Every structure is written in C-alpha cells, then in structure tokens.
C-alpha cells in the first residue's frame, strides 16, 4: 500500500506495562476481553496458561514478559495471533487501535523482542519458530512517535 510515495504498514497498537507495541495487522486475528486462564505447570514464565477461545484451548503469552518487563498484573485484553493453522493469544494491558505507520519509520525503531533476555528468545525459538518470526516483526513504539500519533499528525 502506498500513500504520497511512502509505503505504509497497518499495525495494531497495544499497551503492555510501560511499553507501546506495534503488531503487524496481517498476523492479528481478533481482539477480545481477557478470558479465564488455566495455568500450565512447569512452563516458561511468559506462558500464562491456556484459555478456551471459540471452543479451542489457546496458549496465552504475557506480552509484558516477552518485551522485557515484569509479568503483567493488569491484563485486560487478549490479542489473538494467527501462526499458520494455529493461534495464540497475547495478554496485553490495553489496545489502542489500528494505525497506518510508514514502513521506513517502523524499520528504524526497536524490534518487539529487543528488551527481552537472550534465554527467553532462545526458549521461544526452540518452542515455536513461527511465533518468533511474528514477534520479531513487531516493534516497540517510542514515546515521541506515540505523541505524534496521538496528536493526530498522521506522520510520526
């Protein structure tokens, strides 16, 4: 998609702890209120457990933990992501909405997993390479870009 000669990408902006995350809309399946989660014993701390979504058990990951923050205590929404034939849910504090952001601006900001420890990224890579690809496509949105978006400038 192009606008005034600039390539734009559709992203879903979410808050997770103190961070603002941009998830590629091509991988977002659904946004919903947080559902009850059944814990799964002896799993990585970023896996909160399983939630029953549309009749199927879906793994729920704590987005705050994935992006290098402490485990979230204010989860209010799930963002379900499509990974091929599978889906998983990211637990986030809030969803801001869909935005069109210049691809060049997104390429210049930190990847979603930039603040994560190497052990966590390696765990994800071992468990699910497709999930790792989706999360690496996400970006951390810096405050100055968020302020420009919130002010309605249209261009960060």
Image (tube, rainbow, N blue to C red):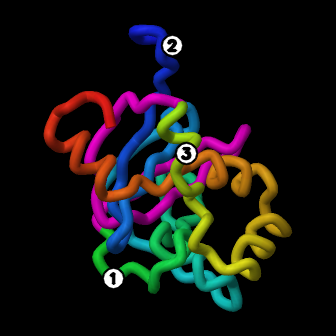
Could you say where residue 80 lies in the image, as x and y percent from the top left?
49, 49
**Lower position in the chain sequence, tag 1 or tag 2:** 2
The residue pinned by badge 2 equals 1
**Lower position in the chain sequence, tag 2 or tag 3:** 2
Q: How far apart are marks 3 and 1 (CA)?
A: 30 Å
Q: Give the range drawn in magenta.
A: 76-103
Q: Is residue 54 visible?
A: no
The residue pinned by badge 1 equals 73
Vertical relation: 150 (above or below) 143:
above
Q: Is residue 64 visible?
A: yes
Judged by depth in the image, the label closer to the viewer, 3 or 1, is 3
The residue pinned by badge 3 equals 108
Give SS at disc 3: loop
Residue 141 is a magenta residue: no
Residue 94 vs residue 53, the one in the foreground? 94
Give SS at disc 2: loop
Q: Distance between the residues labelled 2 and 3?
A: 19 Å
Point out the residue furthest to the bottom here. Answer: 42
75 vs 27, left or right, is left
**Lower position in the chain sequence, tag 3 or tag 1:** 1
Judged by depth in the image, the label closer to the viewer, 1 or 2, is 2
Q: Which residue is drawn at 52% across and 30% down?
A: 103
């Amino acid at each position: 998609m192009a606008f005034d000669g600039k390539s734009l990408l559709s992203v879903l902006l979410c808050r997770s702890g103190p961070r603002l995350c941009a998830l590629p809309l091509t991988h977002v399946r659904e946004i919903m209120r947080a559902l009850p989660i059944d814990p799964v014993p002896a799993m990585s701390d970023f896996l909160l457990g399983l939630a029953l979504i549309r009749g199927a058990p879906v793994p729920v990951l704590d987005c705050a933990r994935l992006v290098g923050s402490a485990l979230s205590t204010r989860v209010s929404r799930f963002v379900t992501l499509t990974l091929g034939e599978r889906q998983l849910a990211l637990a986030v504090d809030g969803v801001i909405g869909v935005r069109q952001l210049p691809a060049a601006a997104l390429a210049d900001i930190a990847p979603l997993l930039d603040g994560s420890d190497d052990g966590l990224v390696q765990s994800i890579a071992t468990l699910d390479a497709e999930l790792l690809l989706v999360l690496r496509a996400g970006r951390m949105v810096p405050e100055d870009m968020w302020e420009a978006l919130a002010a309605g400038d249209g261009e960060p």
